[in-house]
Image: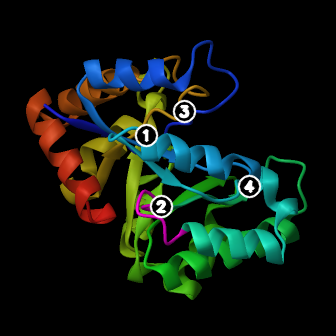
């Protein structure tokens, strides 16, 4: 059984051990693909280096909304260059965040510009969204994200929102929120999602203490869908590979 983690921050400073250890633990758990999104431009070279040195690791450079103030012409040119790297298979994580103390106009400028770069490069996008889903979906609709697709990461919204995102060509990233005892809406959404729209993630280390938590998420998905764990691996991995063209 081979699984894919579509959202893991392997170079985050919160880890107590080097990235190599997380990669080895993931491999031992049967996780065959680790997609690491960008947060700030200073991290991009490290993301690429890690991907070049580990077969299971890929990179999705981009500016998180918290780093939207970094966006300028030189950063845009660097992202354009990185989109041609063979280990870069997406752009992310990009989007809008209504909780952060970052000017929403700056966020929107960086978000829209990165979307344009991703679409021009033919790369899918990893979407971050908190408290701004209507605005994010509207922007995605205007920019033609259907051409490349993407993943709505860390999903915890309604089935209606999920269907709107799927109509725009996005897959739904399901992670450790599904394991919370007080999770009510997300399990019902997972039960009802189209099979072809479901992918798994940990968002470690923020949302999970180690990569193996992905298997716990997969077990919960299997329980909700009436699948075996092997079926869950096959389905979600096929969805990832189809989107990322691996």
Residue 180 visible from this viewpoint = no
| 231 lies left or right of 74 | left
The quadrant in which the N terminus is found is top left
Q: Which residues are magenta?
A: 83-90
Seen in the picture, residue 210 relative to 100 is either above or below; the reply is above
Front of the two marks 4 and 2? 4
Q: Residues within 10 Å of mark 2 (few under 14, many from 20)?
A: some
x and y percent of residue 57 in the render? 40, 42
Query: Is the C-beta separation of discs 1 and 3 under 8 Å?
Result: no
Answer whether residue 200 is magenta in the image. no
Q: Which residue is mark 3?
A: 10
Seen in the picture, residue 183 relative to 53 is either above or below; the reply is above
Instruction: Identify the element where label 2 is drawn.
Output: helix
x and y percent of residue 129 in the render? 63, 55
Residue found at x 24% / y 36%: 3
Query: Is the C-beta separation of discs 1 and 4 under 8 Å?
Result: no
Residue most toward the top? 16
Front of the two marks 2 and 1? 1
Q: Which residue is mark 1?
A: 53
Residue found at x 47% / y 62%: 90
Instruction: Identify the element where label 4 is drawn.
Output: helix
Front of the two marks 1 and 4? 1
Instruction: Identify the element where label 3 is drawn.
Output: loop
What is the distance, in whole Å, between disc 1 and disc 4 at their CAs? 20 Å
What is the distance, in whole Å, between disc 2 and disc 1 at their CAs? 38 Å
* Magenta stretch secondary structure, dominant: loop
Answer whether residue 85 is magenta in the image. yes
What is the distance, in whole Å, between disc 4 and disc 2 at their CAs? 30 Å
Q: Residues within 10 Å of mark 1 (few under 14, many from 20)?
A: few
Q: Which residue is mark 2?
A: 161
Query: Residue 41 bears which disc, if any?
Result: 4
């Amino acid at each position: 059984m081979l699984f894919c983690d579509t959202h893991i921050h392997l170079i985050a400073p919160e880890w107590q051990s080097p990235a190599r250890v997380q990669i080895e633990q993931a491999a031992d758990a049967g996780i065959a693909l680790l997609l690491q999104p960008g947060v700030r431009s200073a991290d991009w070279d490290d993301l690429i280096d890690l991907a070049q040195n580990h077969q299971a690791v890929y990179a999705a450079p981009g500016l998180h909304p918290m780093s939207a103030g970094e966006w300028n012409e030189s950063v845009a040119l660097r992202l354009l260059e990185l989109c041609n790297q063979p280990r870069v298979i997406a752009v992310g994580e990009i989007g809008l965040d209504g909780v952060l103390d970052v000017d929403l106009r700056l966020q929107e400028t960086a978000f829209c510009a990165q979307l344009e770069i991703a679409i021009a490069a033919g790369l899918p996008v990893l979407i971050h969204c908190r408290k701004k889903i209507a605005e994010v979906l509207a922007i995605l609709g205007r920019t033609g994200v259907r051409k490349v697709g993407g993943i709505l990461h860390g999903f915890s919204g309604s089935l209606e929102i999920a269907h709107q995102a799927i109509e725009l060509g996005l897959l739904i990233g399901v992670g450790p929120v599904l394991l919370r005892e007080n999770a009510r809406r997300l399990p019902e959404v997972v039960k009802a999602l189209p099979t072809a729209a479901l992918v798994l993630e940990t968002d470690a280390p923020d949302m999970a203490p180690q990569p193996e938590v992905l298997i716990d998420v997969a077990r919960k998905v299997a329980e909700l869908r009436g699948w075996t764990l092997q079926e869950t691996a096959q389905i979600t991995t096929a969805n990832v590979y189809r989107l990322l063209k691996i």
